[in-house]
Image: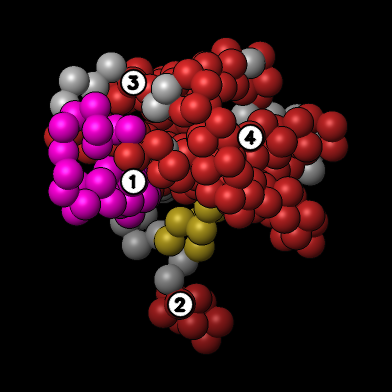
Amino acid sequence: MTEKADDICLGEIDSPDDSEKPKSWPGSRKWRNVLLIALLTFVSPFGSSMLAPSMDKVMAEFGSTNTEPESLTVSIYVLGYAFGPLVFAPLSEIHGRRVPLLASSAMFVIMSIICAVSVNLPMLIVFRFLTGLKGSSSLALGPASIADMFVPQHCGKAMSAWNLPVLLGPAIGPLIGSYITQSKGWRWNCWFLVIVLSFCSKSRMLRHCSSAKPVERSSVVTINPPSEMLLDGLV
């Protein structure tokens, strides 16, 4: 902001020659980030339905015959999607996209581990909700990251590549989940998510994820309010 209290901040000055701007990155780097964010986005919806085929074994192990907690255990994961963006979207505007993605991925792994070692049904339900809450970051920040890297005319292909895992994840989850349950037990559904997301989080590519920096004072454009411009025109 300038010294005038009535100045209006418009935003940053984007230079096409600024190599630090994600829009100025080479195409290979942009698409590498799109694919990685798409992979992170795939894991979260994948985990939402992965446990569904094994709920009979879960209920039998915890000695419950009530069908309401059985449905809640699966569906409460998606409830986390309603609250996660309220946290991660503002954080991404302050700290950039990378910090919320890394932090939420680490928390997703921790919550999945706790789900895998749950000792009772309420514990599993609570941490399934928290897992969905942490897993919502890639859904909330994926479009924002693409908008950081691509001009509007070229966002269509990137958005299509990012959106495909959102549709495929819930469809493929029960297929793989049922196989894992039959061969290893229902807890290995959670361990599978831990293994996959740990690999993604440790990937060297993740450190290059687009980062929207907060507006700095040196890169702010200001204009006079309309009333002042009108007076200037009349003088």
Looking at the rendered structure, which numbered label has been put on residue 74? 1
Query: Which quarter of the picture shows residue 51?
Result: top left
Q: Are marks 1 and 3 in contact (CB under 8 Å)?
A: no
Q: Earlier in the sequence, mark 1 or mark 3?
A: 1
Q: Residue at x 18, y 20 (%)?
A: 119
Helix, strand or loop at disc 1?
Answer: helix
Cα separation between marks 4 and 1: 22 Å
Residue holding disc 4: 39
> What residue range appears in magenta?
57-83
Foreground disc of the pair 2, 3: 3
Tell me if I can see residue 69 in this picture.
yes
Q: Could you say where residue 145 lies in the image, as x and y percent from the top left? A: 60, 43
The amino acid beneath tag 1 is: Val
Q: Residue at x 46, y 56 (%)?
A: 9
Residue holding disc 3: 116
Cα separation between marks 2 and 3: 60 Å
Q: Residue at x 68, y 51 (%)?
A: 164
Q: Is residue 28 left or right of residue 182?
A: right
Q: Nearer the viewer, residue 235 or 3?
A: 3
Q: Is residue 75 left or right of residue 203?
A: left
> How was the colour assigned to the protein in this rendering?
secondary structure
Q: Is residue 186 left or right of residue 220?
A: left
Q: Is residue 162 magenta?
A: no
Q: Are marks 2 and 1 in contact (CB under 8 Å)?
A: no
Question: Crowding at label 4, few (<14), some or many (≥20) Cα neighbours within 10 Å?
Answer: some
Q: Nearer the viewer, residue 190 or 55?
A: 55
Q: Earlier in the sequence, mark 2 or mark 1?
A: 1
Q: Earlier in the sequence, mark 4 or mark 2?
A: 4
